[in-house]
């Protein structure tokens, strides 16, 4: 088959895989190749058991794979054959040297720029899909144009806003697609090429364009605002616990103001995920670099409140259970950083598990999709940890259940049966406020929600 365009994506992760699967699904006229240095990951993308759990993803991958969607490790060939290259490699927080613990680690990103320069034989459009510090496109441009081989590159910023667990829905029907470009004639032509791809399924009024720096910055700011809302509501949950106010009632009242809106106001054990913390720290680092310490302090507070909320949850368990957890068995319901994903990156459950082990409790962890990752995250911890898929079995003999992830299955559990199998007094700490607290109290549990009065039998 002759394709209209060859599209390459470097990085077959949570973003590269699903976004390219969606383009392939919507645009049969384009050939999409997704490459990665991780051969195992590519093998999984080519297998029956694809490496990411995301509702709806399996179907669209399998419907396009081998037709116009290909997964491969042949990076050089991919670069040579492509007209448009999306770069979707990881940009984690730097763990060494200047900016350690704050700045984005751009080594993977820079390596791809150098690979593109080395192998490209024709003009190309390079699309930043990864989340990057503002002005990264400038560095990319300098690397790509540092040898005079006559090849022209246009660099675009097209940050990804999908959330895990709803990636396919978000990609199919995005609130917005943002494309930033240089305002030169060739930059604008490249921008229009990318608009043309998205316009195959996204209404034009949802495709917005801007200058390239605004686009890079908008991504960091979007995540910072979302995380800020969670830290705002979580900070108030602490005050509710002191005053007998109820965080759900407060969130409902606040959220009904149409200027504020009611989404992202669920108080929780804290936000996790691979991006919120890293992107805010990246923003903080940028601000400090530009001498904007007050602005940096303001955003750093969002991360500080999240850390506080996680630690507060551990202390709540400790205090409620008579100030000792040594030898007690605590069953964690959920380990993923949110429901409908097997991803555990930066999951509050990791920190909380480590703290509970420090307090010498024994853990039984259950999760419908994330047990494999949980085992990797907690590998080497010096304590007793069991990983059990069935929540009923996991809870047997426990002193307490702590809900870490808002999986729907935990709402539908027969808690009378669970209560009967547990040690007494039995405790439930609902870190997501998803359970029917009154009912659990009637069953016999001592119930500790977030930001609401506890219901205890003492
Ligand atoms: P990921 O770690 O799942 O995937 C990145 C992939 O890039 C890995 O498989 C890695 O092997 C590969 N890679 C690294 N260097 C490479 C190279 N030189 N050549 C080929 N492959 C290489 O990361 P992710 O979650 O997909 O995130 C990618 C980017 O997208 C990050 O900047 C992230 O901030 C951003 N983002 C992520 C999400 C999300 O929900 N996970 C959402 C929006 C934006
Ligand atoms: C987030 C953003 O929502 C995406 O737009 C963005 O593209 C992505 O980060 C990214 O850049 O990686 P994601 O991390 O997948 O997506 O998931 P969210 O739904 O945003 O949830 C993040 C965390 O906040 C989860 O731990 C979730 O449980 C928590 N959360 C969310 C709350 O505690 N309360 C809420 O009301 C909402």
Image (tube, rainbow, N blue to C red):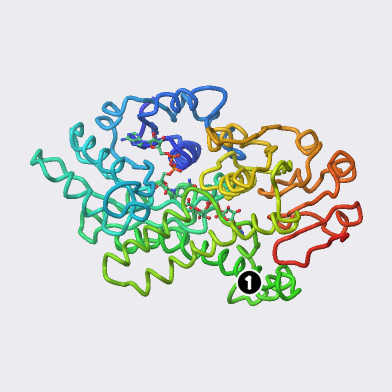
The answer to whether residue 366 is seen in the rendering is no
User: Is residue 229 shown left or right of residue 84?
Assistant: right
Residue 45 vertical position relative to residue 281 in the rendered view, above or below: above
Residue 23 vertical position relative to residue 104 in the rendered view, above or below: above
Q: Measured from the top left, where is residue 144 in percent x and y? A: 18, 44
User: Is residue 185 shown left or right of residue 58?
Assistant: left
- Which quadrant does the C terminus fall into? bottom right
Which residue, given by chain and number where applicable, does mark 1 sit on?
Answer: 236
Which class describes the residues within 10 Å of circle 1: few (<14), some (14-19), or many (20+)? some
- Residue nearest the viewer, comparing 150 with 340: 340
- Asked which quadrant contains residue 118, the reply is top left
- Residue nearest the viewer, comparing 406 with 14: 406
- Which quadrant does the N terminus fall into? top left
User: Is residue 354 shown left or right of residue 195?
Assistant: right
- Residue nearest the viewer, comparing 305 with 284: 305
- Residue nearest the viewer, comparing 392 with 342: 392
Q: Residue at x 34, y 42 (%)?
A: 87
The secondary structure type at the circle numbered 1 is: helix
Residue 138 vertical position relative to residue 251 in the rendered view, above or below: above
User: Is residue 128 shown left or right of residue 40?
Assistant: left
Residue 213 vertical position relative to residue 104 in the rendered view, above or below: below
Q: Measured from the top left, where is residue 11 in percent x and y? A: 38, 37
Q: Measured from the top left, where is residue 45 in percent x and y? A: 49, 27
């Amino acid at each position: 088959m002759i394709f209209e365009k060859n599209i390459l994506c470097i990085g077959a992760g949570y973003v590269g895989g699903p976004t390219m699967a969606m383009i392939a699904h919507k645009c049969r006229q384009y050939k999409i190749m997704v490459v990665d240095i991780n051969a195992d990951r590519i093998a999984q993308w080519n297998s029956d058991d694809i490496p990411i759990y995301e509702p709806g993803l399996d179907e669209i991958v399998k419907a396009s794979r081998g037709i116009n969607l290909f997964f491969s490790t042949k990076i050089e060939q991919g670069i040579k054959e492509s007209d448009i290259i999306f770069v979707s490699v990881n940009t984690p927080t730097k763990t060494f040297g200047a900016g350690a613990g704050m700045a984005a680690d751009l080594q993977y990103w820079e390596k791809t720029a150098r690979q593109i320069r080395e192998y490209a034989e024709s003009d190309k459009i390079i699309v930043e899909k990864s989340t990057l510090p503002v002005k990264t496109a400038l560095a990319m441009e300098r690397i790509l144009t540092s040898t005079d081989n006559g090849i022209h590159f246009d660099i675009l910023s097209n940050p990804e806003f999908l959330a895990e667990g709803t990636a396919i829905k978000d990609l199919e029907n995005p609130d917005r697609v943002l494309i930033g470009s240089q305002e030169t004639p060739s930059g604008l032509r490249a921008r229009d090429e990318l608009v043309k791809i998205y316009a195959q399924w996204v209404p034009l009024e949802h495709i917005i364009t801007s200058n390239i720096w605004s686009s890079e910055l908008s991504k960091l700011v979007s995540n910072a605002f979302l995380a800020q809302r969670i830290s705002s509501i979580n900070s108030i949950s602490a005050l509710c616990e002191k005053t007998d106010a109820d965080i759900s009632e407060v969130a409902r009242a606040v959220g009904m103001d149409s200027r504020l809106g009611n989404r992202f106001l669920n108080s929780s054990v804290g936000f996790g995920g691979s991006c919120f913390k890293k992107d805010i720290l990246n923003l903080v680092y940028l601000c400090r670099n530009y001498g904007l310490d007050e602005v940096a302090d303001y955003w750093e507070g969002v991360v500080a409140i999240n850390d506080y909320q996680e630690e507060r949850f551990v202390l709540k368990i400790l205090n409620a259970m008579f100030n000792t957890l040594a030898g007690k068995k605590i069953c964690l319901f959920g380990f993923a950083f949110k429901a409908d994903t097997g991803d555990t990156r930066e999951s509050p459950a990791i920190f909380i598990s480590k703290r509970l082990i420090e307090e010498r409790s024994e853990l039984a962890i259950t999760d419908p999709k994330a047990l494999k990752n949980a085992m990797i995250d907690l590998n080497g911890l010096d304590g007793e940890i069991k990983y059990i898929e069935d929540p009923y079995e996991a809870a047997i003999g426990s002193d307490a259940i702590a809900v870490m992830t808002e999986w729907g299955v935990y709402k539908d559990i027969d808690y009378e049966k669970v209560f009967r199998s547990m040690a007494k007094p039995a405790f439930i700490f609902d870190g997501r406020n998803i359970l029917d607290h009154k009912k659990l109290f009637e069953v016999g549990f001592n119930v500790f929600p977030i930001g609401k009065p506890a219901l205890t039998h003492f």
